[in-house]
């Protein structure tokens, strides 16, 4: 246990200005107190340099540099320095504004996942503060979640303050005092250190952007891009290894593709490959957020079909995600099917069990009102439909008779072989391949949940763009990697929408076989006009 220092200021008044109320933190250079400015009755923060370090010229210069660097800043998201001076006992102090909130490390530990919208809101403010600092010739050099305070204000949730410029570099300094860092000397926190900072090279503002990239990676995944048990190990990995994509480190995290690309680019080894400056970084981050909002906008999202009603699963952790959390990778449930279908299906007639297994088209280019006839034009189209049906029946009767279909009918010289494909019908080979897939048992050794998830996401994106063919292909690839009954339900719906009834029946039968008590059974059988026969086990 550490014995309390002799310079414990709690209850004392410093420089006849600040009455110290409580110790709120401490570090290698000094201790941080909550105090009250007597003249204004205002709460402030006092950072007091340790007595034992007053004889260290380099440490004193660094402490003074912090006050000087912070005093240059005039941004709402940067901590404000109010005063700098010396206490009665000779100790140096810095008086700063008090921020009532938590640091970002505490928020990350207690509230992850934060939601992409919330992450953008926090990091964009950090970049705003950095843009102002870099413009004033100040490089922070020690950005990390512990140096970012987040305050919940009434009209500004997650209001950010960037603090601790203790090792900041002032790029245009002309001071003649002692150099704060020597050539090849590394300062900063290893987990967030840029490659050039790790090798002790000359730094510019892009080193701070790399640290923001590490913070962004951590906020989205809950993990650092590199893991090590030593400072040297972290520095070596920042110098030599490429960070794994966030979605690979945390497949369950909701990270948009645009966000992942921006994070990986910011973590480039070469400063030239990162965003040009903090303002450019912030603009790209806001573009990612704009794209997320656009894809989530109900007015732009295609209306889902009945079976694919988008009701997301409840979180297995029991946690409510942030209200701005995106819907990436939301899955559809059987319960969603059952709850959504009654709203869109027309009431079935009393003899529904005897209905043929055909799909009734309800869409019409001619608007009509319920209970009102279509008039002369409607009668014309109905008559034309009847004539076409009769004509088609006569044609196929003639075709069947002259190709040997009847017992005594003559054989036409134009007879078509029985194994020839019929125009408009799915080829036998394609049908067999489809049948093999929805009846196939996927061995556990051949399953890959991660690949299946990627194919499902690609299928969902294709479906949002209206490309049902690509969506089917991706869902089938996903099914081959993980035969999820809900994928079978989706594929049945898509084939139903494309009027490929046999394929729809096959996929729905597979779903009902895998989920014996499926709540969607009654609705599927209503659509297909009767009980669905279960496919035989392979």
Image (cartoon, rainbow, N blue to C red):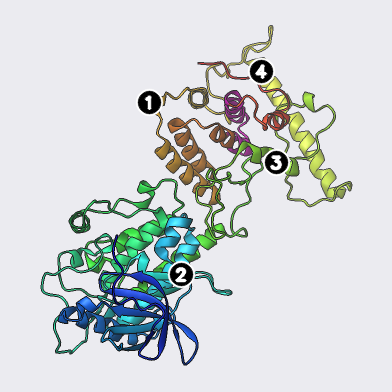
Q: Mark 4 vs mark 3: which is more N-terminal? A: 3
Q: Nearer the viewer, residue 471 or 2?
A: 2
Q: Mark 4 vs mark 2: which is more N-terminal? A: 2
Residue linked to disc 2? 150
Residue linked to disc 4? 400
Q: Quadrant of residue 178?
A: bottom left
Residue linked to disc 3? 339
Q: Mark 1 vs mark 3: which is more N-terminal? A: 3
> Callout 2: 10 Å neighbours few (<14), some, many (20+)?
many
- The majority secondary structure of the magenta stretch comes to helix
Percent across and percent down for residue 325 are 53, 57
> Callout 4: 10 Å neighbours few (<14), some, many (20+)?
some
* Residue depth check, mark 4 versus mark 2: number of the one nearer the observer: 2
Percent across and percent down for residue 463 are 54, 47
Spatial separation of the CA atoms under disc 1 and disc 2 = 47 Å
**Which label belongs to residue 271?**
none
* Residue depth check, mark 1 versus mark 2: number of the one nearer the observer: 2
Residue linked to disc 1? 445
Q: Is residue 506 magenta?
A: yes
């Amino acid at each position: 246990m550490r014995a309390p220092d002799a310079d414990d200021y709690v209850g004392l008044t410093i420089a006849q200005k600040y009455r110290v109320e409580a110790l709120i933190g401490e570090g290698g250079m000094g201790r941080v107190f909550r105090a009250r400015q007597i003249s204004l009755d205002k709460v402030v923060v006092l950072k007091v340099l340790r007595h034992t370090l007053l004889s260290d010229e380099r440490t004193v210069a660094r402490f003074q540099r912090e006050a000087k660097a912070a005093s240059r800043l005039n941004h709402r998201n940067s901590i404000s320095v109010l005063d700098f001076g010396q206490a009665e006992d000779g100790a140096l102090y810095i008086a700063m504004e008090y921020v009532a909130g938590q640091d970002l490390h505490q928020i990350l530990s207690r509230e992850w996942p934060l939601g992409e919208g919330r992450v953008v809101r926090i990091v964009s403010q950090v970049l705003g503060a950095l843009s102002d600092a870099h413009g004033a010739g100040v490089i922070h050099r020690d950005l990390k979640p512990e140096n970012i305070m987040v305050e919940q204000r009434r009209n500004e949730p997650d209001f950010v303050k960037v603090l601790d410029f203790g090792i900041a570099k002032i790029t245009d300094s002309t001071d003649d005092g002692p150099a704060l860092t020597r050539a090849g000397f590394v300062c900063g926190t290893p987990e967030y250190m840029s490659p050039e900072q790790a090798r002790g090279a000359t730094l510019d503002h892009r080193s701070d952007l790399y640290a923001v990239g590490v913070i962004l990676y951590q906020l989205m995944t809950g993990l650092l891009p590199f893991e090590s048990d030593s400072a040297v190990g972290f520095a070596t990995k920042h110098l030599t290894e490429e960070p794994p994509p966030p979605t690979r480190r945390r497949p369950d995290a909701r990270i948009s593709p645009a966000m992942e690309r921006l994070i990986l680019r910011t973590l480039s080894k070469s400063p030239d490959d990162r965003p040009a400056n903090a303002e450019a970084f912030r603009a790209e981050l806001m573009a990612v957020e704009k794209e997320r909002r656009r894809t989530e906008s109900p007015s732009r999202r295609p209306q889902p079909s009945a079976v694919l009603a988008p009701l997301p699963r409840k979180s297995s952790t029991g946690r409510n995600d942030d209200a701005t959390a995106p819907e990436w990778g939301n899955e559809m449930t059987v319960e969603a099917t059952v709850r959504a279908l009654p709203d869109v299906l027309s009431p079935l007639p009393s003899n529904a069990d005897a209905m043929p297994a055909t799909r009734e088209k309800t869409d019409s280019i001619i608007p009509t009102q319920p209970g009102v006839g279509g008039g002369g034009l409607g009668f014309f189209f109905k008559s034309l439909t009847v004539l076409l049906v009769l004509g088609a029946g006569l044609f196929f009767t003639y075709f069947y008779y002259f190709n040997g279909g009847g017992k005594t009918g003559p054989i036409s010289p134009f007879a078509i072989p029985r194994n020839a494909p019929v125009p408009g019908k799915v080829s036998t080979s394609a049908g067999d391949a489809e049948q093999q897939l929805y009846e196939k048992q996927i061995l556990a050794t051949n399953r890959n949940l991660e690949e299946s998830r990627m194919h499902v996401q690609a299928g969902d994106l294709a479906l949002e763009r209206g490309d049902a063919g690509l969506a089917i292909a991706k869902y089938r690839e996903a099914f081959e990697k993980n035969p999820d009954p809900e994928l079978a339900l989706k594929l049945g719906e898509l084939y139903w929408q494309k009027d490929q009834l046999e394929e729809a029946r096959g996929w729905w039968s597979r779903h009902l076989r895998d989920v014996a008590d499926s709540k969607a059974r009654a609705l599927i059988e209503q659509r297909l006009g009767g009980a669905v026969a279960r496919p035989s086990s392979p």
